Image: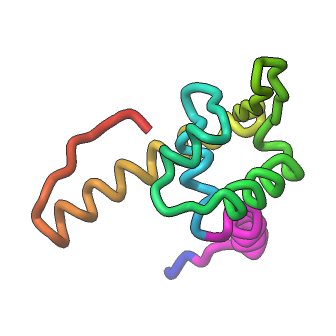
């Protein structure tokens, strides 16, 4: 007997992909998994992302209640981002993606990456 994925599961996956779609959102979430970061630090951490794209992706993540933005009254003023409690529920997903990616690279390329905390 062949087991099929239920329509509700497929819809749930589609909803998840709609929220996390794009090249950068998962990288941003992964970068914020363990600590809050300033905008400039996020841009340095995520190689290849432009300031405009980072700003846009952070706004989307804020709208979906995954990231909080805090203006810090320093001189000059800086902005910090951190995952919300709801956003932190994705930490396990990010860790599983990283584990799968390490195994995939090992299988396909034959190289093992150093496993670092996500």
At x 40%, y 50%, the residue is 98
Is residue 5 on the magenta stretch? Answer: yes
Comparing 83 with 42, the one in front is 42
Q: Is residue 92 above or below residue 113?
A: above
From the viewer's perspective, is 60 left or right of 25?
A: right
Region in magenta = 4-22
Q: Quadrant of residue 109?
A: bottom left
From the viewer's perspective, is 96 left or right of 107?
A: right
At x 48%, y 44%, the residue is 45
Residue furthest out toward the left = 110
From the viewer's perspective, is 72 left or right of 91?
A: right
The answer to whether residue 85 of the structure is visible from this angle is: no
Q: Position of residue 74 (x, y in %)?
A: 77, 18
Q: Quadrant of residue 54?
A: bottom right
Comparing 11 with 52, the one in front is 52
The answer to whether residue 23 of the structure is visible from this angle is: yes
Residue furthest out toward the front = 75
């Amino acid at each position: 007997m062949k087991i099929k994925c239920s329509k509700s599961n497929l819809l749930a996956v589609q909803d998840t992909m709609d929220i996390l779609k794009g090249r950068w959102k998962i990288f941003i979430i992964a970068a914020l998994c363990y600590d809050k970061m300033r905008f400039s630090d996020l841009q340095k951490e995520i190689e290849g992302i432009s300031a405009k794209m980072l700003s846009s992706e952070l706004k989307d993540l804020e709208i979906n209640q995954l990231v909080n933005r805090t203006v810090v009254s320093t001189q000059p003023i800086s902005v910090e981002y951190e995952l919300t409690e709801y956003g932190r529920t994705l930490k396990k997903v990010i860790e599983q993606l990283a584990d799968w990616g390490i195994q995939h690279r090992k299988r396909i390329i034959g190289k093992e990456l150093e496993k670092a905390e996500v």
